[in-house]
Image (cartoon, rainbow, N blue to C red):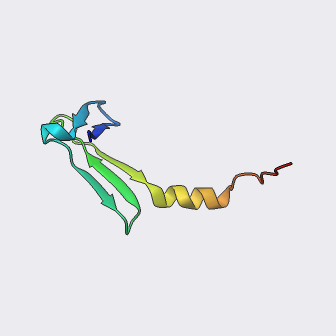
């Protein structure tokens, strides 16, 4: 399986086969983190699942009715 991450700041793509990819899954804080390995960037790309879950509870999807 190939895993690739693209930095949200500089746009550089990193693949796991090149030994330059590091992804952290934090189940306690409900975040996914990828640190860009570009020496000029070093951006910490964080996806917050916990915040998404809170927003979803505040504005739920409309009720669906099946006829």
Residue at 15% of width from left, 41% of height from top? 20
Residue at 68% of width from left, 56% of height from top? 60
Residue at the limit of the structure toward the bottom, as seen here = 28
52 versus 6 height, above or below: below
Q: Position of residue 31 (x, y in %)?
A: 38, 58
Is 29 in front, or is 18?
A: 18
Q: Position of residue 33 (x, y in %)?
A: 31, 52
Q: In the drawing, does residue 2 fall left or right of residue 65? A: left
Q: Report the number of discs.
A: 0
Q: Position of residue 8 (x, y in %)?
A: 35, 37
Location of the N terminus (image quadrant): top left
Q: Position of residue 55 (x, y in %)?
A: 59, 56
Q: In the drawing, does residue 58 fall left or right of residue 20? A: right
Residue at 37% of width from left, 69% of height from top? 28
Q: In the drawing, does residue 10 fall left or right of residue 29? A: left
Is 39 in front, or is 56?
A: 56
Is 17 in front, or is 26?
A: 17
Residue at 23% of width from left, 36% of height from top? 14
7 versus 45 height, above or below: above
Residue at the limit of the structure toward the right, as seen here = 67
Residue 10 location, quadrant? top left
Residue 48 location, quadrant? bottom left
């Amino acid at each position: 399986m190939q895993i690739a991450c693209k930095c949200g700041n500089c746009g550089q793509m990193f693949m796991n086969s090149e030994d330059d990819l590091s992804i952290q899954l934090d189940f306690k804080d409900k975040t996914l983190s990828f640190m860009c390995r570009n020496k000029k960037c070093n951006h910490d790309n964080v996806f917050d699942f916990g915040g998404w879950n809170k927003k979803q509870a505040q504005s739920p999807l409309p009720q669906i009715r099946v006829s």
